[in-house]
Image (spheres, rainbow, N blue to C red):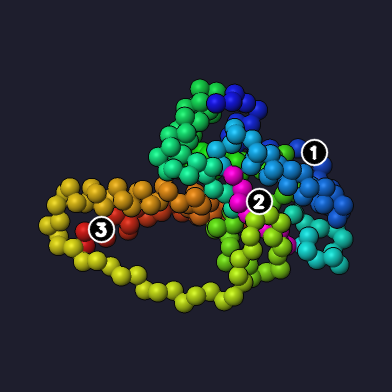
């Protein structure tokens, strides 16, 4: 594994004076796209960028003095095999821990690969407002936007949500079955490539959501 502590998680700092002119914003966007290319080509990073969508005031030519450059990104693990990807992620967690980084909770450890890429993309820019595409997709696709990298998605109206079917289980469900159901739920939660962005809801407004309600997920497994 390449030793590159300069890219260590989370790599999000603000420095310098922000340039609010359109030319300044274009320059910041070009620098951001260069970081996207670097992430996808550099084997150090465990994640890759699969979609970049620009939205907000940058798409309004009549506005000369702009606010932040709003960009939504979709990330995925470079390793297709879940077990190998998770093993590599925890190797990175251990490495960063030896370098002095302290993880606040389990979710930061599980999402280390994600936040390391997300932080590097944000970089030192004070004008790039970075959002998780999977978490903000319902909003991004309903406002003027432009896909800069990756495929475009349909902007047709949202499908009518279907009522989930809940399987009924007896209250004397064996402990072993309960454990298997919990493990399956945990596997699905960890395997989601966008899960950590959705759980913490990090977007251009830097809103903090709530952690998943594990009791609601696991408690319903056996009725």
How far apart, in angstroms, are the residues tagged by discs 3 and 1?
Answer: 52 Å
Cβ–Cβ below 8 Å for labels 3 and 1? no
Quadrant housing residue 133: bottom right
* Residue at screen point 50% across, 55% down: 198
Instruction: Provide the residue designation for mark 3.
Output: 221
Residue 106 spot, x, y in % from top left: 42, 39
Identify the disc placed on residue 16. Answer: 1
Q: Is residue 115 above or below residue 167?
A: above
In terms of secondary structure, what is the magenta stretch mainly? strand
Please indicate whether residue 11 sits to the left or right of residue 210 in the image.
right
How far apart, in angstroms, are the residues tagged by discs 2 and 3?
Answer: 36 Å
Disc 2, SS: strand
* Residue at screen point 71% across, 56% down: 148
Q: Earlier in the sequence, mark 2 or mark 1?
A: 1
Disc 1, SS: loop
Task: Sort mark 1 into few (<14), some (14-19) or many (20+) by Cα contacts within 10 Å.
Answer: few
Quadrant housing residue 41: top right
Instruction: Provide the residue designation for mark 2.
Output: 130
Q: Is residue 54 magenta?
A: yes
Q: Which residue occupies the extreme left position in the image?
A: 172
Residue 45 spot, x, y in % from top left: 59, 36
Q: Earlier in the sequence, mark 3 or mark 1?
A: 1
How far apart, in angstroms, are the residues tagged by discs 2 and 1?
Answer: 18 Å
Q: Which residues are magenta?
A: 48-56
């Amino acid at each position: 594994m390449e030793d590159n502590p300069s890219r260590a998680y989370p790599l999000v700092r603000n420095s310098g004076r922000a340039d609010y002119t359109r030319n300044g914003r274009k320059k910041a966007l070009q620098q951001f796209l260069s970081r996207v290319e670097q992430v996808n080509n550099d084997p150090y990073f465990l994640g890759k960028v699969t979609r970049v969508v620009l939205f907000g005031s940058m798409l309004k030519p009549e506005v000369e003095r702009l606010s932040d450059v709003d960009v939504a990104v979709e990330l995925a693990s470079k390793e297709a095999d879940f077990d190998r990807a998770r093993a590599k992620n925890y190797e990175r967690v251990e490495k960063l821990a030896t370098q002095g980084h302290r993880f606040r909770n389990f979710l930061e450890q599980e999402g280390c690969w994600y936040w390391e890429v997300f932080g590097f993309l944000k970089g030192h820019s004070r004008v790039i407002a970075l959002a998780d595409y999977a978490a903000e997709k319902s909003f991004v696709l309903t406002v003027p936007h432009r896909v800069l990298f990756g495929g475009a998605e349909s902007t047709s109206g949202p499908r009518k949500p279907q009522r989930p079917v809940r399987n009924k289980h007896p209250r004397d469900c064996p402990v072993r079955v309960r454990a298997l159901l919990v493990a399956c739920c945990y596997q699905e939660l960890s395997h989601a490539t966008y899960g950590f962005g959705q759980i913490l809801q990090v977007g251009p407004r830097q809103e903090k959501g709530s952690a998943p309600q594990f009791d609601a997920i696991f408690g319903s497994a056996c009725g």
